Amino acid sequence: MRRPRGEPGSRAPRPTEGATCAGPGESWSPSPNSMLRVLLSAQASPARLSGLLLIPPVQPCCLGPSKWGDRPLGGGPRAGHVQGLQRLLEQAKSPGELLRWLGQNPTKVRAHHYPVALRRLGQLLGSQPRPPPVEQATLQDLSQLIIRNCPSFDIHTIHVCLHLAVLLGFPSDGPLVCALEQERRFRLPPKPPPPLHPVLHGGQRLEAALSCPRFLRYPRQHLISSLAEARPEELTPHVMVLLAQHLARHRLREPQLLEAIAHFLVVQEAQLSSKVVQKLVLPFGRLNYLPLEQQFMPCLERILAREAGVAPLATVNILMSLCQLRCLPFRALHFVFSPGFINHISGTPHALIVRRYLSLLDTAVELELPGYRGPRLPLRQQVPIFPQPLITDRARCKYSHKDIVAEGLRQLLGEEKYRQDLTVPPGYCTDFLLCVSSSGAVLPVRTQDPFLPYPPRSCPQGQAASNPTIPDPAQRVVLMLRERWHFCRDGRVLLGSRALRERHLGLMGYQLLPLPFEELESQRGLPQLKSYLRQKLQALGLRWGPEGG
């Protein structure tokens, strides 16, 4: 078997040594053994070892002719001389010869020749079990040549020279490594100075935290402690509005914080406009929380009486929040249902949303305030309250259980015996609606009028909801999905808008069958869900199939 030809004056490395010494035209990657011999021959100091360990290798580190010789920088008639010098460097037989080729041809030396020389030096040192000693003067002269010319190197050449210098044992605190490192830092773009963070206290710190988009990751206790540390003069309306919006947006039903907002509203009543008050009151209605502050409602009534004609939209927004809390003041209702107020908002850009809110308030008056004797919203001004699923449900439809519940009802009852997403007067969207006979048989929806009359006429106010067993020739059962996002963050209290819808549907005579998210999430697969729905419907006394008509 023919032995592979090595470099002149050297022999091929033994397989047991593990050295990876590249010849001309090959990339070089020193093996652990060859690096160890280099470091031992150079009497490596701890500084050199730290330099070897801390400076990461540059990838890719391919220094063969494919990168440095085939495409010499500049091209032209001098390209042949450049390639010829590179071949001489790659075939040098000793470190002294390397230095001679570099020093005797200053006009032919280019920046990329220095990494080639360092690579060849490593090959010479790693190609023999006992590499010849290198005179310190030779290494010093080579260092001076690189130091003198490194300002003309590009960043890649600097990285490669720095890496190879450390591998060859040049000290990390020596002139060569320091010069290359300095050039490397000089080429890097300067880092901008860190921004100066002013010292924030109390309300300022709370305001900065609430303005951070990622504040939801912070513990809720941080909110409470920040509020407790703030002095009264630091709790500005802007800070409290940010706090109220944060609680409402993230469904955080924190009694301590909500009570603090209510107290602030009472104390600062004279300085607050209705546009600010609507934002402060928003979390109470959304989170279905009536504060313990005794002056909360009297304060709001005074603000509404003072500001109602100034900001119509803010006025109805405040009343919407109070409607969710079942705390509607008669005096404010008299004002918003007056012909003057209705005519005033008719030509404004937000007329439709105000009419929708007034329609909901009129529904609340019809169903919940039997003692009200003031003006009402004219029939021609009424619009559907919520003619389609809410924005939150549409945004989270892929997380909803509605599709699998619909499939379970289809297989259990048949498509003709339920309606999905049906909007019933005065404008509430139902998840699933069933028509049921007086005997409990589920009837085909197409043969029945799915709507109960509105306003309800069959019984006194609230009696249908409190006593659903009253005989009715055709009852209406509404299956209400209670998804996780229909609740406050604690998962126990329904949001104000959801509680209002269920309360009004019950007062209109619909029999409600809630399907809580905890129960739906515990069902594993469609067969188990069908069994769950069967139990729920049978518990109401419903029958279907051949025996159910």
Image (cartoon, helix red, strand yellow):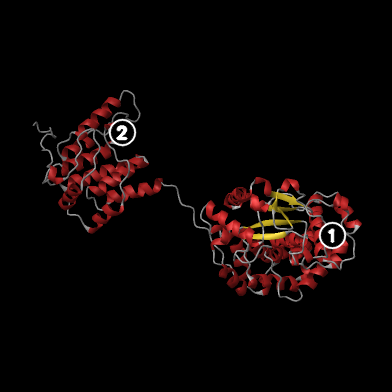
Name the residue located 84 percent from the left edge and 65 percent from the top edge. Answer: 332
Question: 26 or 431, which lies in front?
Answer: 431
Mark 1 → mark 2, Cα distance in angstroms: 91 Å
Near-viewer residue (210 or 434): 434
Q: Residues within 10 Å of mark 2 (few under 14, many from 20)?
A: some
Q: Which residue is mark 1?
A: 457
Seen as rendered, the residue at the extreme left is 1
Outermost residue to the top = 77
Amino acid marked by disc 2? Lys
Relative horizontal placement of residue 483, taking residue 385 as reference (left or right): left
Nearer to the camera, 435 or 523: 435
Position of 77 relative to 491 (above/below):
above
Q: Secondary structure at mark 2?
A: helix
Which residue does the image show at 51% across and 55% down from the upper left? Answer: 524
Instruction: Judge left or right: residue 422 versus residue 375.
Output: left
* SS at mark 1 in the image: loop
* Label of residue 67 in the image: 2
Q: Is residue 457 left or right of residue 61?
A: right
Q: Are marks 1 and 2 in contact (CB under 8 Å)?
A: no
Where residue 116 sits, quadrant-wise, is top left
Which label lies toward us, 1 or 2? Answer: 1
Q: 168 left or right of 129?
A: right
Most distant residue in the front direction? 547
Q: Position of residue 36 (x, y in %)?
A: 18, 51
The amino acid beneath tag 1 is: Arg
> Tag 1: Cα neighbours inside 10 Å, few (<14), some, or many (≥20)?
few
Q: Earlier in the sequence, mark 1 or mark 2?
A: 2
From where the camera sits, is residue 203 visible? yes
Residue 68 spot, x, y in % from top left: 30, 33
Could you tell me residue 250's position as x and y percent?
A: 62, 61
Name the outermost residue toward the bottom. Answer: 294
Which quadrant of the structure image shows residue 540? bottom right
